[in-house]
């Protein structure tokens, strides 16, 4: 049986799931409305990194063939232009704002929350009618006195980049497509989790993928890999995998603090095919080699009428290009003109899912999570920490203080900025570089 502490965790998870289901249903049926009693049509997810990347991937993946009950928008960057662009796509009276932060202290998210609160005040809307929080128990955002419409807990043992199957993804995705769709997505996640945990080594798909990745990086010395989904619906998969993989495995020491004998992790980038063929595939075929992972979908999400061009349907044309690219990378081609010669023998792999149902998208997401964790375990590193993000935050706090003093017109009481920082601060405040 489960240990007592695990029994409590399971109970807490079920409570959060039940609260998500009830909340999303009440919003859809108009039992929960905004300050002016209008039904919600849009929701803006305010968060950064793992607080939005995975959720955005799943939302975009599930949209083809489905009409969202509530449209989702993602406010991640502290750049005011990100905020301004979203304001052109929403109506203040019918918009929910979902603040996602485990600690509720993340600088960018808190800065954007300040903008959101000011926006609500300008439009005479109450925070307790339009703000939702997703945060850890005991965080500043978990204070019962906060004026919010609803608050959902994320658990402290779940890292942001692995949190899509928690309230972080559950609340937005249930609002967008209904809780039943989110539950189907969880079914796919659980299916891959069970496979990763139980399948024999020879049949374990994410373990095999992790071994291939280690071979490419440690033995063949490739320092980058591309993730190329041949599906526009999966356009946000590369940035999600980029964070999961690079933040989990970008380490130089093992779990005991000893230097690693070989590099861990690699640069991950990507774009959907066939678009990628017309941007960086020139380098993929004739420049420095790097592994390419293709993702194919057997059935498109859009079930509308298709017509043929050159005898094939659009989705078939997509697959013709996908298969051709794997062959071109592997086989290459000799030519009397060296500029037209392809060396071949360039590594690639192909991941195939049957369709864009919630279950299949859940399978795909959990495949990349399990693959990343397996690779971390085999390299004897911790795939769940990310201390590499901290130094920049520390340095930014000092620069922020100098900016605040200049904004307030108060003399600096600390160490004056170094010449380079002083140069850019002057340019920023003057709006020009002298």
Image (spheres, helix red, strand yellow):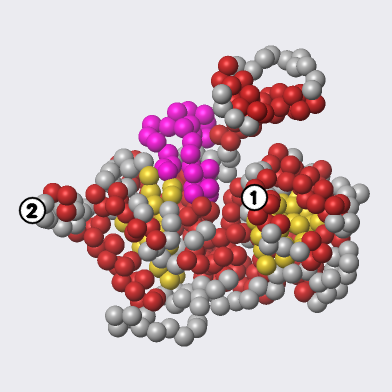
Q: Name the spot of residue 366 as percent of width and height, x first.
A: 53, 60
Q: Is residue 262 magenta?
A: yes
Instruction: Choose between 81 and 338: the one closer to the eye.
Output: 81
The quarter of the image holding the C terminus is: top right
Q: Name the spot of residue 427 as percent of width and height, x first.
A: 61, 27
Q: Is residue 360 visible?
A: yes
**What is the quadrant of residue 421 in the picture?**
top right
Q: Name the spot of residue 155 as percent of width and height, x first.
A: 71, 51
Q: Which range is magenta?
A: 242-267
Q: Residue at x 65, y 48 (%)?
A: 81
Q: Distance between the Cα atoms at labels 2 and 1?
A: 50 Å
What kind of secondary structure does the magenta stretch mostly adopt?
loop
Q: Is residue 202 visible?
A: no
How many C-alpha atoms fall within 10 Å of the one at disc 1: few (<14), some, or many (≥20)?
some
Q: Residue at x 63, y 32 (%)?
A: 431
Question: Taking 107 as reference, is 301 above or below it?
Answer: below
Instruction: Choose between 408 and 170: the one closer to the eye.
Output: 408
Which residue in the structure is indicated by mark 1? 82
Which residue in the structure is indicated by mark 2? 336
Q: Secondary structure at mark 1?
A: helix
The quarter of the image holding the N terminus is: bottom right
Q: Secondary structure at mark 2?
A: loop
Question: Taking 276 as reference, is 354 above or below it?
Answer: below
Q: Residue at x 61, y 47 (%)?
A: 49
Relative to 235, 119 lies left or right: right
Which residue is the extreme one toward the left? 336
Query: Between disc 2 and disc 1, whose residue precedes?
Result: 1
């Amino acid at each position: 049986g489960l240990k007592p502490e695990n029994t409590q965790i399971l109970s807490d998870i079920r409570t959060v799931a039940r609260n998500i289901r009830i909340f999303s249903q009440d919003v859809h049926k108009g039992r929960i409305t905004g300050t002016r009693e209008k039904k919600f049509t849009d929701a803006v997810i305010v968060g950064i990194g793992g607080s939005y990347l995975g959720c955005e991937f799943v939302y975009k993946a599930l949209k083809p063939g489905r009409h969202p009950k509530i449209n989702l928008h993602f406010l991640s960057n502290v750049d005011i232009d990100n905020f301004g662009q979203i304001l052109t796509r929403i109506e203040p009276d019918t918009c929910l704002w979902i603040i996602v932060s485990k600690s509720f202290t993340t600088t960018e998210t808190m800065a954007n929350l300040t903008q959101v609160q000011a926006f609500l005040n300008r439009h005479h809307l109450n925070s307790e009618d339009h703000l939702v929080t997703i945060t850890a128990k005991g965080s500043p955002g978990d204070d019962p006195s906060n004026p919010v419409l609803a608050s959902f807990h994320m658990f402290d043992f779940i890292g942001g980049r692995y949190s899509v199957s928690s309230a972080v993804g559950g609340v937005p995705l249930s609002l967008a497509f209904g809780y039943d769709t989110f539950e189907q997505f969880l079914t796919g996640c659980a299916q891959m989790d069970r496979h990763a945990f139980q399948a024999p080594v020879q049949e374990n798909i994410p373990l095999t993928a992790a071994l291939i990745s280690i071979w490419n990086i440690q033995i063949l010395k490739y320092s980058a890999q591309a993730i190329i989904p041949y599906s526009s619906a999966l356009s946000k998969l590369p940035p999600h995998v980029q964070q999961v993989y690079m933040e989990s495995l970008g380490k130089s020491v093992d779990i005991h603090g000893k230097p690693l004998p070989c590099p861990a992790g690699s640069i991950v980038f990507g774009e959907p095919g066939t678009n990628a063929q017309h941007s960086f595939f020139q380098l993929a075929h004739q420049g420095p080699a790097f592994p390419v992972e293709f993702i194919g979908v057997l059935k498109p999400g859009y079930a509308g009428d298709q017509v043929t061009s050159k005898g094939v349907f659009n989705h078939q044309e997509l697959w013709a290009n996908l298969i051709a690219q794997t062959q071109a990378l592997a086989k290459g081609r000799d030519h009397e003109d060296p500029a037209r010669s392809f060396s071949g023998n360039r590594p690639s792999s192909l991941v195939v899912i049957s369709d864009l149902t919630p279950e299949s998208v859940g399978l795909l997401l959990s495949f990349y999570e399990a693959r990343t964790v397996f690779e971390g375990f085999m390299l004897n590193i911790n795939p769940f920490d990310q201390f590499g993000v901290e130094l920049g935050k520390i340095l930014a706090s000092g620069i922020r203080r100098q900016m605040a003093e200049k904004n307030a017109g108060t003399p600096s009481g600390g160490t004056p900025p170094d010449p380079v920082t002083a140069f850019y601060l002057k340019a920023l405040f003057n709006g020009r570089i002298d």
